[in-house]
Amino acid sequence: MVDVAAAYASCARDARTHYENFPVASRLVPRDMRHHVAAVYAFARAADDFADEGQRPIQERHRLLDGWLCRLRDAVSESDLSTRPVAPGEPSNTHDIFVALGATIRDKDLPPSLFEDLLSAFRQDVTVGRYGSWADVMDYCRRSANPIGRLVLRIAGYRDAQLDGWSDSICCALQLTNFWQDLKIDFDRGRIYLPDEEMRVHGASAADLAGSVLTPAWIRAAASAVRRTRTLMDDGRPLCDAVRGRLGYELRATWLGGTRILDRLEAAGYDMIHRRPSLGPADVPWLAWRMLAWSLVGPVRQAHGPSTLREPQGRREQGRGTTGSGQGEP
């Protein structure tokens, strides 16, 4: 008999042991959501590693992603997941990931298409190295980042087009922020996410990246990219105030973490070649102070007026923040 609780625990360990610019299934997330968020994260993290990590040939990366898609469909159809042995290159906890993910998809009625969008983006990473326009980059973000935000909202019980739109803006901004963090790392892997049209406007050259030369042209291009990313982040900010309870605090921490990275890119003179800003324990006091200030007076960059609080569909706010499951938040 499959131990679903153990499968969720395995996914939670994955969430704790990987670095991200944002909290994943942290204690800010309501307790009844954490295991579901961890299952989604474990699925996506493994697939992203198939596309990016190690020295695998293209054929092997495609094989692993194809296998992940087959396992996803097995989980959705409630097929016997044990019939597919763990393939070479897959994580040792593969069965746990899909046992947990299948349970989450059924429990929260999650659209399988959002998971398929993620896999299509990871597959694109294997073969696409350059992007001609911002429209191309944003289409990639639509599939690589936006599904995560929408899945979290649906796990929380929210199904609202306006909330989805704000979530998409934040998720795109976080994805772009990660691109600017990893500009040189991605270049060494054969990819540049800054679109050709932006590079041409400023006269930035891929040859400068190859030589690790920070030119005035690259500084201008990087500054423009950061400004565009900040606009998206500000466009999505109302989401952080539009959901109730602990999830709102998780979203605020996520938003603040992304803007913190952008601040550091700006402070470094938009040097995306020699420096990689990241978040660490030293940022915790700053994050805590900013979250407290937000609760009292709003964020530093107040780009929008007050937002409307919305009730999640299918959930009823009760005393002491309990959910429809009857299990209170810690």
Image (cartoon, rainbow, N blue to C red):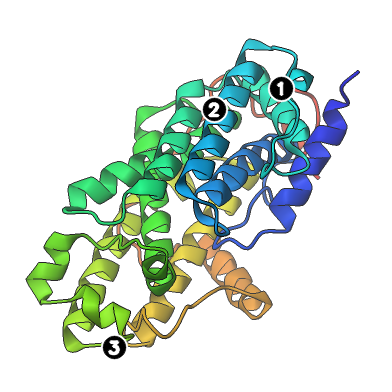
Q: Residue at x 30, y 85 (%)?
A: 211
Q: Residue at x 44, y 83 (%)?
A: 275
Residue placed under numbered mark 3 in the picture: 213
Marks 1/2: CA distance?
Answer: 16 Å
Q: Which residue in the rendered view is the most extreme toward the right?
A: 1
Could you tell me which quadrant the N terminus lies in? Answer: top right
Amino acid type of the residue tagged 2 in the rendering: Leu
Q: Is 192 situated left or right of 104 in this image? A: left
Does the CB distance between marks 1 and 2 fall below 8 Å?
no
Q: Is 79 situated left or right of 139 in this image? A: right
Residue 69's label in the rendered image is 2
Earlier-in-chain disc, 3 versus 2: 2
Marks 3/1: CA distance?
Answer: 49 Å
- Is 226 rendered above or below residue 132? below
In the structure shown, which secondary structural element does the residue marked by tag 2 occupy?
A: helix
Residue placed under numbered mark 1 in the picture: 103
Q: Position of residue 183 (x, y in %)?
A: 37, 70
Which of the pair 329/14 is nearer the observer?
14
- Is 122 rendered above or below residue 3? below
Could you tell me which quadrant the C terminus lies in? Answer: top right
In the structure shown, which secondary structural element does the residue marked by tag 1 occupy?
A: helix
Amino acid type of the residue tagged 1 in the rendering: Ala
